[in-house]
Amino acid sequence: FTDIPNSRIHRWSTDGKLSTFRENTGRANGLFFDRDGNLLCCEGGARQLTSVSPDGKVTVLANDYDGKKLNSPNDLWIDPQGGIYFSDPRYGDMSDLEQDGFHVYYLSPDRKKLTRVVDDMVKPNGVLGTKDGKLLYVADAGDGKTYAYQILASGELGERKLIAPVGSDGMTLDEHGNLYLTRGAVRIYSPSGES
């Protein structure tokens, strides 16, 4: 788990011991393990998406779009093919933004192509997909709404459907497909959007 202000990632072991996994994390926020055991990190302060190998080697996966620095990568989800969706809002100082807004991106499984897949939100934050890779949930924390998108070929997204009238930071799904959103309280929504 991340300690954003102190730029650290900590590890809590199954035997109850706390240790520091990494320091100087670029104020990492969202984390996700890929199938090879690499820890992917949204380094908001460093404005990049990175991968940390099991032996500690850090590789930058994305730090710009269309030749302009990312805002502050925040949260991510890896699809079944290994592609990465991540949100890129900004909180705090807005003085050095290069992008034309706050968006969601998709990095192809081969890590070679970065595509902007959502460009019409106020401030996207939490992102999460279903285990089968068919739906992507994106919380627009800036507009107080959460949407579901059908995932199409090559990581592209279909039209959005409002799934909840609240935004969220962190979110998760249970084995029944219920979506848990965290904004002031934990709210639970069924796959059809019923609370």
Image (spheres, rainbow, N blue to C red):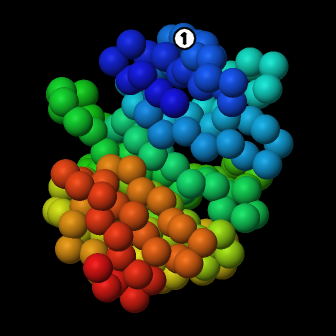
Who is closer to the viewer here, 120 or 52?
52
Q: Residue at x 35, y 38 (%)?
A: 71
Name which quarter of the figure residue 174 lies in: bottom right
Left or right of residue 2: residue 163 = left
Kindly give the residue lying farthest to the front in the view shown.
Answer: 15
Who is closer to the viewer here, 25 or 116?
25
Residue 75 locus on image (x, y percent): 45, 46
- Label 1: which secondary element: strand
Decide if residue 195 is in sight here.
yes
Name which quarter of the figure residue 166 lies in: bottom left
The kind of residue on which mark 1 rests is Glu
Who is closer to the viewer here, 2 or 28?
2
Left or right of residue 36: residue 49 = left
| Vertical placement of residue 138 versus 1, above or below | below
Q: How many labels, in total?
A: 1
Q: Name the residue under label 1.
A: 23
Decide if residue 67 is in sight here.
no
Q: Which residue is drawn at 51% across and 66% down?
A: 173
Q: Which residue is drawn at 43% across and 70% down?
A: 179
Left or right of residue 13: residue 126 = left
Question: Crowdedness of circle 1 by 10 Å Cα count: few (<14), some, many (20+)?
Answer: some
Question: Which image quadrant: the C terminus?
Answer: bottom left
Residue 100 locus on image (x, y percent): 27, 50
